[in-house]
Amino acid sequence: MAEASDTKDRILDTAEHLFAERGLGQTSLRQITSHAEVNLAAVNYHFGSKEGLIKAVLARRLEPLNRERIRRLDRLERQGHVTLEGLIEAFIGPPLELSRDGGGGSRFVRLMGRTYTEHASFLHEHMRHANEALVNRFKPAFRAVLPELPKTELYWRLHFLVGVMSYVMAGNDMMQLLAASRNSEQEEPREIIRRVVPFLAAGLRAPLPEELAQARDVLEASPRDPA
Amino acid sequence: MAEASDTKDRILDTAEHLFAERGLGQTSLRQITSHAEVNLAAVNYHFGSKEGLIKAVLARRLEPLNRERIRRLDRLERQGHVTLEGLIEAFIGPPLELSRDGGGGSRFVRLMGRTYTEHASFLHEHMRHANEALVNRFKPAFRAVLPELPKTELYWRLHFLVGVMSYVMAGNDMMQLLAASRNSEQEEPREIIRRVVPFLAAGLRAPLPEELAQARDVLEASPRDPA
DNA sequence: GTCTATAAACGGATAGAC
DNA sequence: GTCTATCCGTTTATAGAC
């Protein structure tokens, strides 16, 4: 029931599946149409090209996903208490929770984690554009809850946050590269979130690296002045 | 002078370069031999196959790299003061510092970051095996400096650490996916290390996520007991 | 060890019948 | 909207001359 019945959606579902499992470049249109049991030519008929198919697969879930993240931020601000933990959870919660959806959701989340490292210029441009509104909305919110943090430092730490998020999103595959003993059972997304939020919040609140902060950022933000 | 003159090393250098720039699957042997100005057949002659070439490219730098990480940990322990910050720096410092080497080093570091997400079963097995000694050496060391942290929680946090490390190692490409304003100049590896170590140390030392810790880990490690 | 030439398979995309 | 058949470029890998 997670699979739609008409050709176009069957292609989207199967492509999402295979892209997430094998990567974009390693998945051929023939593999997709074969698994989806549709004709090869149907891909070009419905999506124009492989590139068009990839964009369609991403857009189908990314747009509602980012709307949800922004919606949660809106709600935090409406309620008047925007905490760092709340911000982090509004940002990383929706994609991680999507993993619970036993159907396409978990596969798509892995796919998203993968787009951060796949190498195709159109993909980078597409993702940057698709995330633009999200970034413009969250950046000032993070600045507001971490006002003592110099701008440059904050942006680096947000990069570190994204690093953790995409790593977790990419799933167990890469986690098993390090773990000799693999966790046979993957944890619930809610539990991962509860593990990762304190980690990230503590990292974002960490004391500044000493001299570096003073040498670089003294001009662009007021350093902590306890006096 | 970073480029060797004989065929075998020219292939390795060029392959490292192109693999890092475009990804493993997206780089063909023809592109490599063309850039290296060697014959296509030379690849199979020297390395047997594309897979053999990939393994050779990785092993050439990964083995001395991991030896250096372990060497630093050895030194920390010999000197008798193993701090969390010191451990983190021994683990992530060598790969990040390799970026300073204007020659193959920085390219290889990006390549390493990429292997964590490329999808090829032989690659995963190869990397897992290549990192086995490293993991077995560092895991107990982290446990020793964070004795109050339940085992499961520590392993998750080490995963988060690797997430940050591989993200930073993969370089500016993916960082620009989020940043509307790109930092035209990339920072010195030493400065990145000084930014990321406090972030990671704070994250690893973060207070436990409350109930979760008690519900799961109460049996396998003593929870913090201030009394 | 290095070359040319080519095999054999696979990739995306399209034309044209139905 | 779906199908078959096909074009055409690219891929890895190898055979055999030098």
Image (cartoon, coloured by chain):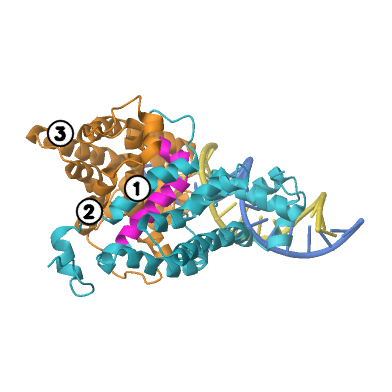
Chain colours: A cyan, B orange, C blue, D yellow
Dot 3 amino acid type:
Asp
Does A161 lie within the magenta span? Answer: yes
C-alpha span from label 3 to label 1: 31 Å
Which is more toward the observer, B50 or A60? Answer: A60
List the residue tagged with mark 3: B74
Chain identifier of the residue bearing label 3 in the image = B
List the residue tagged with mark 2: B193
Q: Residues within 10 Å of mark 1 (few under 14, many from 20)?
A: many
Instruction: Specify which label sits upstream in the sequence, 3 or 2.
Output: 3
Residue stretch rendered in magenta on the structure: A156-176
Dot 1 amino acid type:
Pro
Dot 2 amino acid type:
Ile
C-alpha span from label 2 to label 1: 22 Å
Q: Do the residues at pointers 3 and 2 share their chain?
A: yes
Q: Secondary structure at mark 2?
A: helix
Q: Residues within 10 Å of mark 3 (few under 14, many from 20)?
A: some
Can residue B162 be seen from the camera position used here?
yes
Q: Where residue B206 appears, x then y in whole percent?
A: 28, 45
